[in-house]
Amino acid sequence: MNRKRSTEVQRLPMLEMTPEPVWPQTSQASQMPFPINTARDRRRRAVLGTLVGCLCVLVAAPAWAFDDAAADRALQSAQQKLRATATNPQIPTTQYPKATTNGPWRLVPNTANIDWVQGFFPGQLWLMYEQGRDPFWSTKADAWTRNLELQKSNPDIRQITHDLGFKFMTSFGQAYRLTGDDYYRQVMLTAAGSLARRFNPTVGVIDCCDWNDGTWHVPMVTDTMADLELLFWASRNGGDPAWNDMALRHALKTAADMVRADGGTFHVVDYSTSGAILSRGTYQGFSNSSTWARGQAWAIYGFTTAYRYTQDPRMLQAAQKVTDYYLARLPADSVPNWDFNAPADQQQKDSSAAAIVASALQELSRYVSDPAVALRYRNAALAMLDSLASPAYLAPATGGGPGILLHGVAFYRTAIEPQGEDIDKSLIYGDHYFVEAVSRFKLWNQSGWLSTLGFPGSLHDLGPSNTGVRIVEFDITPLSKPVDGVVGYADTSTNVTAYSSVAMSIRLNPSGFFDVRRGGDYAALASVPYQANTTYHVRMSTDLGAKTYSVWVTPPGGSEVLVADRFAFRSDAPPTDDLGKVALKSGHFDNEFRVRNHTVRAATATASSASTLTGPPRAVQKP
């Protein structure tokens, strides 16, 4: 939401700028296994060719210009802009960019409690650090991140904003994900506790704010959906488990009271202290009956994130409902105007809404079960990125202003805000979600399997035929360090809901090395440390009759190391008679590690679970 009344700003001089796919793009018919020298054969070939051509049309993704090369160009351009801002001596690490056009960034200080944008700049710096682990980015990101710590708590609840999720998940959350430094986690837990203080248990919502008490009573705004991740995450990482229930209750109230029957959204729902709805309308949109585009984007992003953490089907249903409304009303370039219902003479593109949705839809497409819907969502996200990465919306890498995306709208001119605020400008949050969306594209547009927080989403079927002595091999790449990740195996008939469901577990442990589950605990016969963005080869031999398994790990350029020798299956696991499922389970965040080239095969006659195994090349069960 707009925080104009409470925002301190500072204007600075002009910056000097420093200088295997998931979706197939093409498909070809196979060679025909029969001769073609008869009329009958020619007819058969023609019919088959037609069918193959139709199938190609159905499965091939549109040839969007946005691909790996476009993503790299966009990230390189963003990197130049961010480096210029991060090294500008006139921007201290206690000041945070908010908006700009061709002039300097308009800044807000770290002490502006009620403003909401301070996490987005350090968040982008952390995302740049993730790309290549250049310490320049982590050093800069850490400086701007640590200076936000003072906002983690406040004795005056009026100085605690519902937007702590925006501030702390983007900055401290990214820092903890990429470094594992417990300092960041502890700050996030304190901030989550502060956000929880704004939860009204009678109404079942997070009261957004106190600065408009003369008009609102217990207001809920759509923006808060994107803040809930702080509570969801903290409840799973050392915080109060009740925080999860608070966040879910708020999300359910949003779905029930803020989402209209057609999938559009109100911006504000105001309740009485007893929970009765007093009013529903918009604050930053055109009218109370209109749908503010960025508010709709927050709903798409927030419901998708809520589903990631809860796996609650109501969250997935809500995410799809608001998404379908949004997509049905997009213009040809997939970048919405600031309000879907504003009249023609009051339209202005809002690139920030497009960036938020481009990021969210890539994730949502991974959750829906209908392949056609998943493809539609992903293609929509690519179309958005295609436009945002074009010269129409992406600022030149050098020259011009310091922002990354052009044509954002913070607050269009309305009766509430006649002059408007930051119209047709570069907005720091638009930049952040664009960089996040492009980073997600880079992450998810590669082959293999990624780890997830929830067990249902972490599972991959291996089939019921893997019995006796089996050899498993795969390549594993930790994407940060340290992680808390497990590659676990279970029986075909096992309903995998917890770590105790998997009989065999190979772990990237938080101490920074590989270990393996042995009966009631984890152990390692030899220490094999792991590094971020480095690929290791793992080989496992499991004797399903004897209920034992052995594990070897090969570091890059090194020799195979025996880490587990005939370890007993997990003592509290259910009966395991086949190797039917594999789970890639993250401990703290989604996408902590990637597995490629996963294979399962029968052991050779000379191989055993206790010896160094040989056999045919890996050729089965590739994702």
Image (spheres, rainbow, N blue to C red):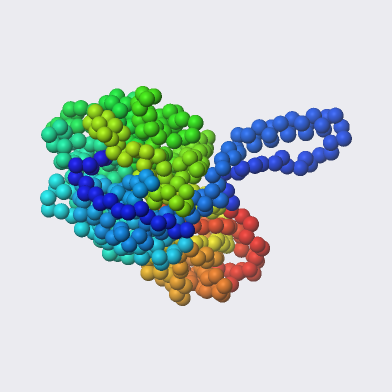
- Most foreground residue, 507 or 22: 22
User: In the image, residue 349 lies at what x, y percent?
Assistant: 40, 34
**On screen, 141 above or below 5?**
below
Q: Residue at x 15, y 32 (%)?
A: 215
State whether residue 346 appears in this view.
Answer: yes
Residue in the picture at 35% in, 27% down: 346
Front-most of residues 201 and 544: 201
Residue 148 image position (x, y, % from top left): 25, 57
- Tell me the residue at 58%/69% (across/down): 608
Name the residue: 25% across, 37% down.
Answer: 221
Q: Is residue 225 left or right of residue 36?
A: left
- The N terminus: image quadrant: top left
Residue 607: % across, % down: 61, 68
- Using the image, determine if residue 336 lies above or below residue 344: below
Q: Quadrant of residue 83?
A: bottom left
All told, the count of numbered labels is 0
- 545 on left or right of 500: right
Can residue 301 be seen here? no
